[in-house]
Amino acid sequence: MDALALEAKSNGEEKKPSAPRPRPKPPKKAKRIVYFEVEIVDAKTKEKLLLLDKVEPTSTILDIKALFHKSNPQWYPARQCLRLDPKGKGLKDEDVLQTLPVGTTASFYFSDMGAQIAWGTVFLSECYGPLLIYLMFYFRLPFIYAPKYDFTSSKHWVVHLACMCHSFHYVKRILETLFIHRISHGTMPLRNIFKNCSYYWCFAAWMAYYINHPLYTPPYYGQQQVKTALIIFLFCQVGNFSINVALRNLKCPGSKVKKIPHPTKNPFTWIFMLVSCPNYTYELGSWVGFTVMTQCLPVAFFTIVGFILMTVWARGKHRNYRKEFRDYPTLRSPILPFIL
């Protein structure tokens, strides 16, 4: 026993053997990424347009559209429609490749959606046209009525009130398009703008021609009918605006998450308890009020056609709500409480 050991033992201290050091864990092997091979085929001719090799599994449909656009610059992403089946439903841009029912070799069928235009541009075109066209008839510009009526004014106060209501409606829609609406679909086919604008512009000209005509006669029940209709119109305009604000606040900017719209503290939104699309309900009410106010047949016809179109849209949204949300309120109707 050496001197240090004897000294430690004499002092009552004995050196304990050191604990064994833990062995370092072997480094984890990196997970192997399984890349996809994506084939893009023309939906009509079945011709192979592009083969993408080593596509990451986390790529979205929008990423694939961007890669396809690099090889075919004439088809920008908004113009493309990719499907898993030639006659199937178009895939969403946010769909992830690895979550789709495809193997590592995936085939997508391409369809050209045609030239596209922003939805915001379409909405503004739909609103600016009726606003300006109606004012042309209201001020009785030349070549509309007889020359002696050029730039004359109607003697009936309901004509002036109708112009203010009509202008208010479309100015409100323009401001909502610019500052309120969050449009989920960025673009639509360019050809649709001619169809949509023709609908709104032609009806505006038809209504304005008769309401501002020099031979126009006021409603049968006079001021009482006009005032009642004005209250209905303004009430529904405020209600429509309230619903648009509530729908805007339902979704955060840039978010794709969908939520069930519910009533808020605003009493105009309480109709959500009974209707899935109260913005259409209030829109219909506004035009019913305008019809009663002017007692004009073209306005009534426009209201009926609009009601049919909005009913189709409301039923579609109502059906989608029920598919997406299992707990969707069963008491709600698409557009008219307990009726439709």
Image: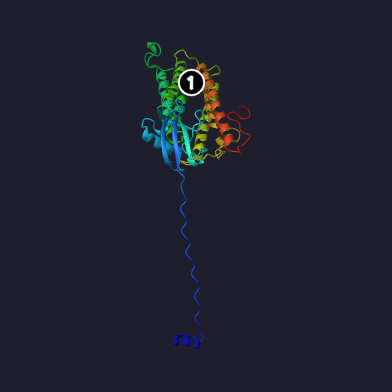
Q: Tell me the quarter of the picture where residue 332 sits.
A: top right
Q: Nearer the viewer, residue 19 or 297?
A: 19
Q: Tell me the quarter of the picture where residue 41 sits.
A: top left
Residue 176 x, y percent position in the rendering? 45, 33
As drawn, is 273 to the left or to the right of 92? right
Three-letter residue code for mark 1:
Val
The correct choice, above or below, for 132 with respect to 91 in the image is above
Report whether residue 248 is seen: yes
Residue 112 x, y percent position in the rendering? 43, 28
User: What residue is rendered at 41% in x and 37% in y?
Assistant: 52
Residue 252 x, y percent position in the rendering? 48, 42
Hey, which residue is sitting farthest front in the picture? Answer: 1
Q: Which residue is mark 1?
A: 158
User: What residue is rendered at 53% in x and 32% in y?
Assistant: 239
As drawn, is 119 to the left or to the right of 300? left
SS class, disc 1: helix
Q: Nearer the viewer, residue 273 or 83?
A: 83
The 10 Å Cα crowd at callout 1, few under 14, some 14 to 19, many 20 or more, is many
